[in-house]
Amino acid sequence: MAGLAASFGSGAMTNTIAELADAKCILVTGSNTTETHPIVGLQIKNAVRKGCKLIVCDPREITLAKMATIHIRQRSGTDVALYNGMMSVILKERLYDAAFVANYTENFDAYKAEVEQWTPARAAEICGVEEAKIIEAARIYATSGASSICYAMGITQHSNGVDNVQSLANLAMLTGNIGRPSTGVNPLRGQNNVQGACDMGALPNVFTAYQKVAEPAINEKFSRAWGVPLSNTNGLTSTQAIVAAHEGHIKGIYIIGENPAVSDPNLHHAREALSSLDFLVVQDIFMTPTAELAHVVLPALVGFEKDGTYSNTERRVLRVRPAVPPVRGARGDWDIICDISTRMGYPMHYNSSEEIQNEIRTLSPSYAGISYSRLDALGGLQWPCPNNEHPGTPFLHKDGKFSRGKGKFHPIPYKGSAEQPDAEYPLVLTTGRTLYQYHTSTMTEHTKGIMTIAPTNHVEVSGPDAERLGIRDGEEVEVVTRRGRVRGKCLTPSRIKEGMVFMPFHYSGAPANTVTNDVLDSVSRTPEFKSCACRIEKIVPGAAPATAVAVHH
């Protein structure tokens, strides 16, 4: 996340998963951890059993909420107000780490002036929670000694997502809960090897290891290594590219392992953009809804057929080898890319994935000590690992050393979600995942057992809202927003807060992202999947499904 990068480097987990078991306090926010990151969830459960105090901030009563010391059910999109409210308590009661703030941070006075305006009473009113819970949560987090923050897409997928992340960074720095074991700010990556893809430069503004394309010395280094002049202009994010395609500025897109025809917001708009391209290439392991729109489909290897490395959510680089022979016709991603590059006039050739890893080490300081031989011997290494003698780095920012020098406090005023409920759309829709399905179900929908357990989309509605709307549990309903409508089976009473609606986004037959808002965070360009205004309509018996009908653009 770009906002965290200013103080915390790459936006990766600052600490290890195992350290969570020894934390004295864990703040979980925007993460249904036991369903979306079960291994991390196990460590959090272990910590609670050992006496750790758990603070859960989520409008749904997720599984971890039942184990929590405090469960704060804030309205979606009000996270900045909540954390400013907590920090105002910490400041007023002088619970912050004054020595850490003085020695290792900057811009404290400007930040303090903003936060002091956010009394817990003011924050509670905006968030729709009890003031006492904000005060208690602040005291527990600030005084536990080793407090860790875990967050996921419930924090980042907002039009104010960078503000949310920076608020959590402020909270960690204010209390000195950074640079020590079992503390830190720990974003839980959404999919396998998301961290590795970011590390390897699959972002529009950096080369490998977050080296900026616009920095002359960095650009020159990569140009010299690859023997070709390289652009020093930042590219577009994936969501920006879809908009540019819709407007006719981009004519061709090459998609590898992504399914935007299900995962992008405002799907009518996204699918129109993909369909309008002169040339669409999709490289994937199944014929996804996105691949069905492509002019060319390139079959790739699945994870169990691959040789190489993954970098997981805790910055740990892990060696993988083929467990089964490849399906006929499928090829490795890097092998396909090398052939295409060669045919386009820039010869690329490697004899093995190890050759690629050695090039990565040469050009990427944080990966310099991560060789196949060391990975084989040690079972994994966490970057930064700058040389062959370095043991890897379990936690970042030891002794208050930030990549930018001092950690910078950011004054963050509360802005709220881009789309607020009104008379026509009185509820707030948020989306997420379930335990059984995975992302856009590209793989899980091919698994009979999973499809038996979780075959169709559902809509979580609170008991009071369902009663007011005359909706019973199990009835089919439609969720309607300014962008369209999508059908699902109503679950009520459910775990969602009154005034809100929850849908998983997995199902290509009834994709929740048909109706989500495609407004973007101004810094990270992440869409606001987690908050938009909606209404619920009962299905008239015998009515045709309307899952793909647009209301308007």
Image (tube, helix red, strand yellow):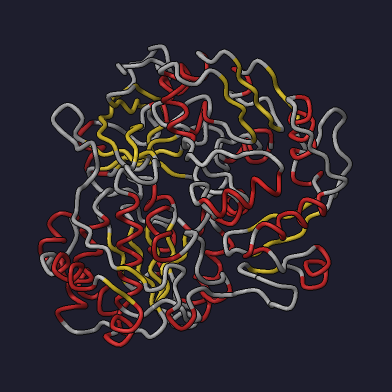
Along the horizontal axis of the image, is 524 left or right of 358? left
Residue 95 to residue 531: above or below: below
On the picture, is 544 further left or further right than 231?
Answer: left
Q: Is 547 on the left-hand or right-hand side of 326? A: left
Q: Which residue is drawn at 86% across and 38% down?
A: 326
In terms of depth relative to the viewer, which is nearer, 244 or 465? Answer: 244
The residue sitting at 25% across, 57% down in the picture is: 80
Instruction: Please name whichever residue, 22 or 49, is drawn nearer the observer in this view of the structure.
Output: 22
Image location (x, y in percent) of residue 473: 36, 36
- Near-viewer residue (60 or 218): 218
On the question of residue 192 being in view, the answer is: no
**485 left or right of 78 in image:** right
Residue 422, above or below 130 = above
Q: In which image quadrant can residue 341 be found? A: top right
Looking at the image, can residue 79 be seen? Answer: yes
The residue lying at 38 percent from left, 34 percent from top is 490
Q: Residue 331: image x %, image y %?
A: 81, 34
Q: Which quadrant would the C terminus be assigned to in this image? A: top left
The number of discs equals 0
Q: Residue at x 29, y 48 (%)?
A: 160
Between 18 and 38, the one nearer to me in the picture? 18
